[in-house]
Image: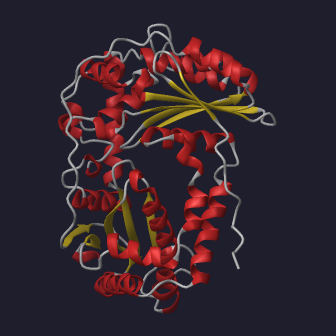
């Protein structure tokens, strides 16, 4: 007897357009929504930076909001907020994106200002110097965060050739060596229509959307030249890469283990690793949480994480614990991976994980802002249509698939591990 699907197959209900200038527009009309999310995604994340320009993409995200020849610094925020809207931005390795949420009737009077910032950012010299201090403080604050420090150290250990190993924030030395003119060149090179996707989701119809985007996103500057960037493929991990960091005032030790997972071109494999992440350490009934926290009480907290990226992805297992339990917990984690390589998971356990992820997907697509982010992200790293393939992909996987994926990606002999320990006098 065939089992009922956990959720019905999802169709891609948005429309995708390519404008004459090369700009991609994704639109979905939600007639019942009083708000609109306008989310602009740019293939200008940290992965495109020359090594010596590390941190430029994130710094530029800050500087985008410092005005244009016709828009004073701070004026954009006032224009959005005075209409009851909100705006923000984010930068990662694969993208930078900028978004506004506003009442549907105000999109016509706000989107042109966002387009002006993205196309004609002035990057004034004095604002560059002031905002650089803000970014440098952000970097210094990150180094005071043991969780950020541990994850960054693990990333650098795993990605020794690929830019995914570099911090999106960059370094103080790299930022101090850059000039406003170099940032203008970076902006003019990458903030071009063929690198951008404008996503509009909410209470505005298709014709109005296309007319508004066409009129707002015109007048792109001619792209400038930049130093060439070679993105090297990361070779497999062939041993245990181990590093220890000793930090003052650290109350609990940290254990972080990581493996290189598939990129977006191996999407079915990525879905399987999502399931394995939930099975291992998501919730009290997951294997590692149940055994290491609830039963053996060797950890205060343990979790696993997997997030798809363009070229490859990180699968991590992290724990907070006492320093004397580090070796034992590492061994238990490896034992669990060995079990998954040798014995298929039960149908009930697989169904629990599938239901959890499918429910999370449903909740993550309820709002206009969530849909816009999903469409924009997938269109930036691959194609937008993949945004709705998740439930079908998750439900298609079988116990033997997870066993094979554990064998392929999650070796108990080949991984990177970073441990954070209190300095001796703090023990």
| Residue positioned 43% across, 14% down in the render | 120
Q: Position of residue 204 (x, y in %)?
A: 73, 26
Can you see residue 374? yes
In the rendered structure, the answer to whether residue 272 lies left or right of residue 406 reads: right
**Viewport quadrant of the C terminus:** bottom left
Q: Position of residue 104 (x, y in %)?
A: 74, 26
Q: For residue 255, which quarter of the picture?
A: bottom left
- Between 336 and 102, the residue placed more toward the observer is 336
Q: From the viewer's perspective, is residue 235 above or below residue 174? A: below
Q: From the viewer's perspective, is residue 149 above or below residue 37? A: below
Q: Position of residue 372 (x, y in %)?
A: 60, 39
Q: Residue furthest front?
A: 1
| Residue positioned 66% across, 22% down in the render | 209
Colour mapping used in the image: secondary structure
Can you see residue 301? no
Q: For residue 192, which quarter of the picture?
A: top left
């Amino acid at each position: 007897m065939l089992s009922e699907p956990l959720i019905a197959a999802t169709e891609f209900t948005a429309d995708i357009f390519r404008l004459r200038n090369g700009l991609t527009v994704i639109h979905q009309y939600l007639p019942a929504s009083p708000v609109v999310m306008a989310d602009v995604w740019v293939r200008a994340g940290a992965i495109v930076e020359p090594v010596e320009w590390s941190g430029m993409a994130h710094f530029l995200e800050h500087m985008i909001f410092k005005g244009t020849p016709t828009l004073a610094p701070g004026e954009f925020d006032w224009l959005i907020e005075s209409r009851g809207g909100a705006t923000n931005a984010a930068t990662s390795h694969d993208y930078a994106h900028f978004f506004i949420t506003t009442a549907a009737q105000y999109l016509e009077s706000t989107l042109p200002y966002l387009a002006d910032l993205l196309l004609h950012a002035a990057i004034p010299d004095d604002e560059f110097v002031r905002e650089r201090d803000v970014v440098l403080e952000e970097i210094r604050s990150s180094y005071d965060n043991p969780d950020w420090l541990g994850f960054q150290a693990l990333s650098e250990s795993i990605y020794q050739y690929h830019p995914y190993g570099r911090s999106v924030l960059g370094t103080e030395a790299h930022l101090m060596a850059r000039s406003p003119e170099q940032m203008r060149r970076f902006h003019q090179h990458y903030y071009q229509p063929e690198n951008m996707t404008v996503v509009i989701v909410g209470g505005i119809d298709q014709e109005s959307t296309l007319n508004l985007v066409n009129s707002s996103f015109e007048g792109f500057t001619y792209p400038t030249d930049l130093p060439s960037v070679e993105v090297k493929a990361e070779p497999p991990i062939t041993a245990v890469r181990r590093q220890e960091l000793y930090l003052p005032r650290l109350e609990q030790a940290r254990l972080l283990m990581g493996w290189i997972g598939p990129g977006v071109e191996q999407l079915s494999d990525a879905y399987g690793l999502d399931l394995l992440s939930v099975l291992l350490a998501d919730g009290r009934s997951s294997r590692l949480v149940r055994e290491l926290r609830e039963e053996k009480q060797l950890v205060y907290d343990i979790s696993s994480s997997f997030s798809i990226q363009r070229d490859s992805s990180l699968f991590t297992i992290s724990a907070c614990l006492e320093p004397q339990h580090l070796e034992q917990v590492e061994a238990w984690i490896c034992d669990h991976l060995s079990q998954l390589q040798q014995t298929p998971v039960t149908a009930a356990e697989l169904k629990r994980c599938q239901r959890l992820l499918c429910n999370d997907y449903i909740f993550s697509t309820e709002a206009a802002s969530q849909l816009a982010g999903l469409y924009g992200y997938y269109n930036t790293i691959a194609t937008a249509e993949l945004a709705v393939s998740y439930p079908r992909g998750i439900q298609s996987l079988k116990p033997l698939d997870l066993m094979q994926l554990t064998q392929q990606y999650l070796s108990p002999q080949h991984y990177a591990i970073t441990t954070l320990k209190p300095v001796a006098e703090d023990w």
